Image: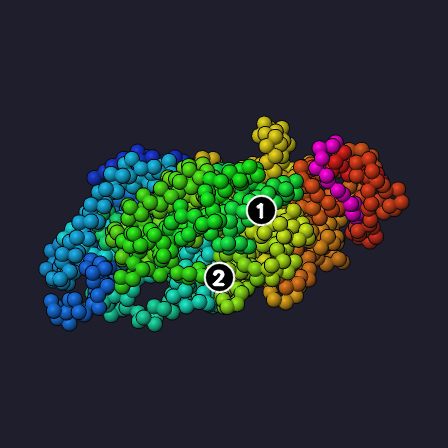
């Protein structure tokens, strides 16, 4: 038998070298350990100073941990660097770095606000007045030296690193001609000087503030040393661990020194420009949208990226994140000028654009991501320094990674966020290929999902009342919520927009409708819920007092007009987060809401307004990402660590670690598509149930890793145009993904049948479903298959129910306590060892002993017509190589919403009973309809719990399941909440003459719902019965008890 070949990933710098020093320019690694036990990052953990040759003395340690230097001459290669993996996978960059910048004077408002030909034409000739856009392209020719060292990166642990020192191409300090081209026109010199002085003063002030400022980080970002005389590109690969099966990522960042004698406005740092080869043809690209509402999903290669239907005036700011570099007028080295692509070629090359990160996958014709081929993930660990954007060509093989800066260089060192790429081999990513990147970003940003209060279930005022709220109608709904505590208990009520006279004037209450927000928060608390309040802290109305009194606080575009914020039914202003006076005002408003008014949950909306595009801002040296980072830090510091923050309209990468919950979709709506007069074909940010469902599924994997996902509210009222099937689909998505469950109707008028739908997904389970076809969807990024698994194989549930926390939850009537407990156990925790993704803890629902193990799969038909949907055979298995759902006796299949039972053969071909694969499961679904299937192996001779119509999990509602007595089954259902419905059971009898059912001491009506055949010619091995059940939640011993004698 041939010896197994160890899979290796090799990073190689293509720098002309001798065989003796080539070792300093490459790293060989195996599967990395960064997702095992978390290693604390310390500034003192960097390696000792390099020796005379520039190499640290850690090579022995590196060899022991299998992060080895490779002795190989790479001078023949055409690329600057490569990262290669097993099976021929390869990532190659044509450059080390590309800088795109302008003279500083071209970036100040005094120039951009002018006609550009009137204010300056008198002091320069026409040729001199041409705007400059300079590219500096760095390749191996500009490498001065390289150094190898060991560093530590927050959340990634110790890494083997190579630092590449580059010589600046454009010698601003000594080139008189270049200084002339970059120097400002005479009439702009004083303006530029004033901006320069303000930026310098602000930077010094910020540095002093940071020494005493609050920080959510417990560790420094990395331990790499700073350099001030060279451009430094640091490449790093995590050191390895034998127990990890994570394909090792490559990380790198750029440190850029300030040009000493020439001011520039740095627009973009292109940190990668090259190709990726996955050894198989890529089929899909996963596009990440800029902020909460932006389109996110996988697109089939060749299909156009979905775009907003509204003109830019109404929608651009919603989706305007990072931008690629513009075509230059001047290139260094100048030999590259003739090789520049045309504007049209650049547009073709950038067919797809993704903010923050991107995934490229090879589906291999499989419906399920977990059965796909190699994959590629690239992005940034954070967005604290720049807004990163990735451009991809139509073939999905050529990429550009741009860190959008668009700010003046003032700081001694300008740095990028850590970039991240991963070549993912087939089946190393378990259920979907983004998992390790999501974990890495969570670790770097010290995310703490579900650590700040329980899973939220409650009510929001917006979608019924919109701005027409008052203390009176709010109080009516709070009272209604209290009356539903035995049916759909809620733990939060959020007062949305409408209490103030104008955005920005947050303490200006509408006359005759509000007197004091303290009264409102106390009303909520009296009804047993946490008070929640909506604010848009960095937005203000045009007619607001704050805008009129402080016009200098408003972000302005390059033409000097207020920056466009997009239209949410109105245009509004964005407040400049780079302005310390704005931040002080926002902090005051947040503190007032929390400390004076008593609100414990804040929904902070339209956050992107803090970093609108435009140079009309206080500090021109601050990037949009830095402004957004500072805005969120201001809010969190003012609110305090215990207030639950829900981010909305927030740039995705910046929010990780700051917010406890994050809106992940566009606003829901009363219709499936955007309602007239809005364009129904929109794929951007317009309100609709379809948009809410799409992003709630395509971003489901962020939940319980980065934050608690907010899929937006459930609309139940008949005032909407939603059908029962569409409401059930929304409930299915919220229940399966365990997002926040917020209602938003006038609860005094919601019909009983619609309210009953919500009871079927409550309590929440704490488990987050995996979207199985996220990277193989074909309908405009809309997936359709999600999976949970339920099991009694662990003792966790019994241990929890013996704990003091469980007893306290009973005393406090906290119905989400169990879900919160298991959600926290399975969610990302920066302080705990990383669980192996193949454990699938996030998607596991713990159930009572005796219930067994089964798979829960939801199918959603997003089409506008009736469609036959299929469950792929391999989707049935809840765990890798697990055959719990496979039996020679076949499987029970229970459809939750329809209440139908069926039996599935264990053989795809009934004539081949030796085939243990579950045959294809198909179901005809109406347009926009969902169904939740429970698939459980048949166990002949033993009673089984098939499900109920009371909870979508078909098991979470069970307290105990006892089959210890002969010919008798005792089922104890949870009795905290009032419920009425049926339980469905398998009895191992054919003749039901002697079957008796009791609910407590009273006989209960029951009926035969189906029969379970056996394999190999056995006609029937048991019956399926449906028993009527009523739970009164009255505390009696018999309540919720179902006894079957057979």
- Using residue 923 as the reference point, say whether residue 193 is left or right of it: left
Q: Residue furthest right?
A: 993
Q: Secondary structure at mark 2?
A: loop
Name the spot of residue 56 as percent of width and height, x first: 27, 39
Q: Nearer the viewer, mark 1 or mark 2?
A: 1
- Residue at point 38% right, 66% down? 313
- Using residue 699 as the reference point, say whether residue 90 is left or right of it: left
- Residue at point 76% right, 58% down? 911
Q: Which residue is mark 1?
A: 477
- Of 603 and 943, the residue lying toward us: 603
Name the spot of residue 75 as percent of width and height, x first: 28, 56
- Ranked by sequence position, the earlier of labels 1 and 2 is 1
Q: Which residue is mark 2?
A: 686
Q: Residue furthest front?
A: 512
Name the spot of residue 816 as percent of width and height, x first: 59, 39
Name the spot of residue 95 as percent of width and height, x first: 29, 58
């Amino acid at each position: 038998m041939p010896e197994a070949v160890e899979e290796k990933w090799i990073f190689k710098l293509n720098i002309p070298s001798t065989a003796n020093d080539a070792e300093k320019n490459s790293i060989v690694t195996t599967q990395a350990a960064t997702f095992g036990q978390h290693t604390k990052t310390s500034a003192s953990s960097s390696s000792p100073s390099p020796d005379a040759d520039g190499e640290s003395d850690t090579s022995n340690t590196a060899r022991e941990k299998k992060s080895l230097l490779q002795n190989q001459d790479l001078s023949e290669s055409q690329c600057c660097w490569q990262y290669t993996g097993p099976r021929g996978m390869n990532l190659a960059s044509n450059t080390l770095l590309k800088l795109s910048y302008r003279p500083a004077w071209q970036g100040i408002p005094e120039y951009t606000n002018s006609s550009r030909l009137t204010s300056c034409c008198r002091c320069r000739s026409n040729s001199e007045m041409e705007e400059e856009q300079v590219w500096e392209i760095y390749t191996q020719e500009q490498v001065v030296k390289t150094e190898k060292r060991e560093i530590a990166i927050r959340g990634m642990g110790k890494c083997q690193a190579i630092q590449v020192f580059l010589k600046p191409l454009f010698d601003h300090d000594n080139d008189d001609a270049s200084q002339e081209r970059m120097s400002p026109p005479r009439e702009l010199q004083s303006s530029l000087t004033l901006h320069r002085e303000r930026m310098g003063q602000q930077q010094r002030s910020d540095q002093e503030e940071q020494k005493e400022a609050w920080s959510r980080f417990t560790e420094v970002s990395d331990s790499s040393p700073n350099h001030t005389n060279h451009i430094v590109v640091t490449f790093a690969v995590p050191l390895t661990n034998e127990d990890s099966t994570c394909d090792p990522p490559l990380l790198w960042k750029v440190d850029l020194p300030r040009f000493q004698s020439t001011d520039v406005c740095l627009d973009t740092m292109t940190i990668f420009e090259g190709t990726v080869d996955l050894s198989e043809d890529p089929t899909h690209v996963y596009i990440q949208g800029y902020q909460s509402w932006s389109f996110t999903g996988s697109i089939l290669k060749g299909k156009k990226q979905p775009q907003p239907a509204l003109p830019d005036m109404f929608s651009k700011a919603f989706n305007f994140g990072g931008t690629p570099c513009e075509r230059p007028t001047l290139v260094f080295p100048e030999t590259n000028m003739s090789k520049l692509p045309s504007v049209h070629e650049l547009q073709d090359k950038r067919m797809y654009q993704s903010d923050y990160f991107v995934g490229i996958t090879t589906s291999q014709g499989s419906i399920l991501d977990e059965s796909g081929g190699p994959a590629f993930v690239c992005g940034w660990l954070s967005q604290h320094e720049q807004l990163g954007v990735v451009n991809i060509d139509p073939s999905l093989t050529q990429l550009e990674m741009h860190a959008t800066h668009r700010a003046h260089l003032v700081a001694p060192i300008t740095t990028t966020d850590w970039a991240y790429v991963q070549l993912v081999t087939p089946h190393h990513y378990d259920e979907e290929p983004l998992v390790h990147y999501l974990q890495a970003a969570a670790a770097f940003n010290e995310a703490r999902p579900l650590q700040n209060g329980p899973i939220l279930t409650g009510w929001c005022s917006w979608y019924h009342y919109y701005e027409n709220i008052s203390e009176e109608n709010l109080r009516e709904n709070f009272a209604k919520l209290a009356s539903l505590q035995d049916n759909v208990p809620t733990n939060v009520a959020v007062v949305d927009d409408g209490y103030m006279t104008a955005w920005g004037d947050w303490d200006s209450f509408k006359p005759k409708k509000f007197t004091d927000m303290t009264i409102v928060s106390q009303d909520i608390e009296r009804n047993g819920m946490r008070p929640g309040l909506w604010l848009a802290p960095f937005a203000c109305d045009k007619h607001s007092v704050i805008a009129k009194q402080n016009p200098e606080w408003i972000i302005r575009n390059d033409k000097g007009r207020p920056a466009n914020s997009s239209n949410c039914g109105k245009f509004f202003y964005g407040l400049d987060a780079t302005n310390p006076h704005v931040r002080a005002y926002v902090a005051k408003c947040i503190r007032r809401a929390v400390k004076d008014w008593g609100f414990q949950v804040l929904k902070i909306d339209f956050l992107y307004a803090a970093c609108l595009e435009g140079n009309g801002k206080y500090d021109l040296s601050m990037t949009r990402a830095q402004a957004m980072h500072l805005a969120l830090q201001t809010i969190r510091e003012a609110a305090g660590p215990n207030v639950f923050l829900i981010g909305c309209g927030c740039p995705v990468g910046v929010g990780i670690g700051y917010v406890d919950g994050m809106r992940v979709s566009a606003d829901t709506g009363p219709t499936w598509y955007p309602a007239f007069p809005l364009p129904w074909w929109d794929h951007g940010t317009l309100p609709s149930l379809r948009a809410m469902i799409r992003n709630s599924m395509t971003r489901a994997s962020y939940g319980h890793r980065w934050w608690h996902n907010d899929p937006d509210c459930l609309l139940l009222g008949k005032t909407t145009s939603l059908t029962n099937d569409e409401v059930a689909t929304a409930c299915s998505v919220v229940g399966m993904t365990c997002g926040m469950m917020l209602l938003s109707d006038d609860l005094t008028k919601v019909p009983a049948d619609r309210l009953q739908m919500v009871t079927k997904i409550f309590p929440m389970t704490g488990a987050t479903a995996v979207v199985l076809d996220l990277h193989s969807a074909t309908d405009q990024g809309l997936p359709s298959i999600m999976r949970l698994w339920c099991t009694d194989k662990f003792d966790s549930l019994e241990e929890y129910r013996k704990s003091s926390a469980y007893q306290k939850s009973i005393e406090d009537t906290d119905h989400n306590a169990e879900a919160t407990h298991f959600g926290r156990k399975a969610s990302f925790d920066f302080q705990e060892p990383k669980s192996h993704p193949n454990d699938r803890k996030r998607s596991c629902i713990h159930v009572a002993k005796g219930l067994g193990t089964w798979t829960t799969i939801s199918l959603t038909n997003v089409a506008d017509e009736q469609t036959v949907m299929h469950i792929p055979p391999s989707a049935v298995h809840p765990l890798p190589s697990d055959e719990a759902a496979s039996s020679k006796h076949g499987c029970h299949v229970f459809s939750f919403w329809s209440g139908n039972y069926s039996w599935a053969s264990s053989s795809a071909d009934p004539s081949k009973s030796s085939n243990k694969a579950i045959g294809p499961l198909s179901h005809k679904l109406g347009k926009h309809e969902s169904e939740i299937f429970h698939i459980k192996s048949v166990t002949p001779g033993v009673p089984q719990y098939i499900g109920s119509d009371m909870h979508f999990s078909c098991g979470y509602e069970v307290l105990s399941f006892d089959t210890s007595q002969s010919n008798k089954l005792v089922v104890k259902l949870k009795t905290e909440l009032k419920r009425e419905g049926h339980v469905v059971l398998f009895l191992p009898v054919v003749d039901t003459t002697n079957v008796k059912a009791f609910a407590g001491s009273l006989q209960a009506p029951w009926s035969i719902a189906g029969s379970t055949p056996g394999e190999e010619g056995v006609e029937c091995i048991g019956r399926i019965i449906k028993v009527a059940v009523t739970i009164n939640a009255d505390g009696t011993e018999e309540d919720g008890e179902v006894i079957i004698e057979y």
